[in-house]
Amino acid sequence: MIRQKIILKFYLLVILLIALIIPVNECHGQTEDRISGRYINVTFLDQLPDQIPGSIPVYCLEINFTGSDSAEIYNGFEEFKLAYRKEGDNFLFVKAVQGNDLSFINNEAGVIILADSVWTGRPTKSVFRKVSEDNYTGDNKWVIEKYLNEKMIAGDYLLFENTNTPGQVVKFLSDGNVEGLRNYKTYSVCFAGDCTGETSPVSNTVTFKTISNESVTFSFRYDRKNNSVVFYDLSEPVSDIKGERKILGVSFELRKKNNN
């Protein structure tokens, strides 16, 4: 009888231990279904500077997983939040496209592959890479513009203005600040929104802000031969008409400093 009681107590102890272990495992499984961190669209960035940013179709440019089951989304001119959930080996953004879910893969290498082909019209899916920007000093909470600047225009240049003689050094910083160019203090390369239709024909544009906070917009193109960026004046905006400003003559040229 004593032996039977000992055996019974042993089995009860085993059952109790199993009951304690199961919730821990379930909780661990839920943790694996959560994603954290900030991801930028490298499929978009890899097409720069050969393509005009505003002409590249994208579902979004940046994803920031700030909640346990939701992410903040930025497409360049608006931001919104989407819930997500695990389904099999993949994840789904809930009601992301016209009420339909949008699937994505999250791998261990800090890469997300978003199945956005229907939206972009591209045969391949978009790849997003995880980035750490804890010390980012830009005014905007989104960091994609920093990476766009690095692709498009950030760097050290020599100024050529109405002469073939190089002038002072001009620095375009990736955080949107500019040094040594007239009285400009910041710049913003157009990549989404109304500015994409600023010129006729459509071109790359950049808007500078002066020390007195006035805005000036130029069209620009790359001169591969001289390793430079050429900036063009634009006609004045027409009242009651958005964009369609004519591209006029050269305003100034910036040649990469290491080219001289």
Image (cartoon, rainbow, N blue to C red):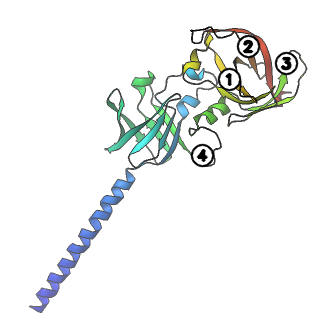
Question: Which residue corresponds to mark 4?
Answer: 133
Question: Which residue corresponds to mark 3?
Answer: 161
Question: Which residue corresponds to mark 1?
Answer: 207
Q: Earlier in the sequence, mark 2 or mark 4?
A: 4
Q: CA distance from mark 1 to mark 3?
A: 18 Å
Q: Are marks 1 and 4 in contact (CB under 8 Å)?
A: no
Q: Residue type at mark 2? A: Asp
Q: Are marks 3 and 2 in contact (CB under 8 Å)?
A: no
Question: Which residue corresponds to mark 2?
Answer: 233
Q: Earlier in the sequence, mark 1 or mark 3?
A: 3
Q: Earlier in the sequence, mark 3 or mark 2?
A: 3
Q: Quadrant of residue 243?
A: top right
User: On the rendered structure, is 94 left or right of 58?
Assistant: left
Residue name at image x 72 percent, y 35 percent: 173
Q: CA distance from mark 2 to mark 4?
A: 35 Å
Dot in front, 1 or 4: 1
Q: Earlier in the sequence, mark 1 or mark 2?
A: 1
Q: CA distance from mark 1 to mark 2?
A: 11 Å
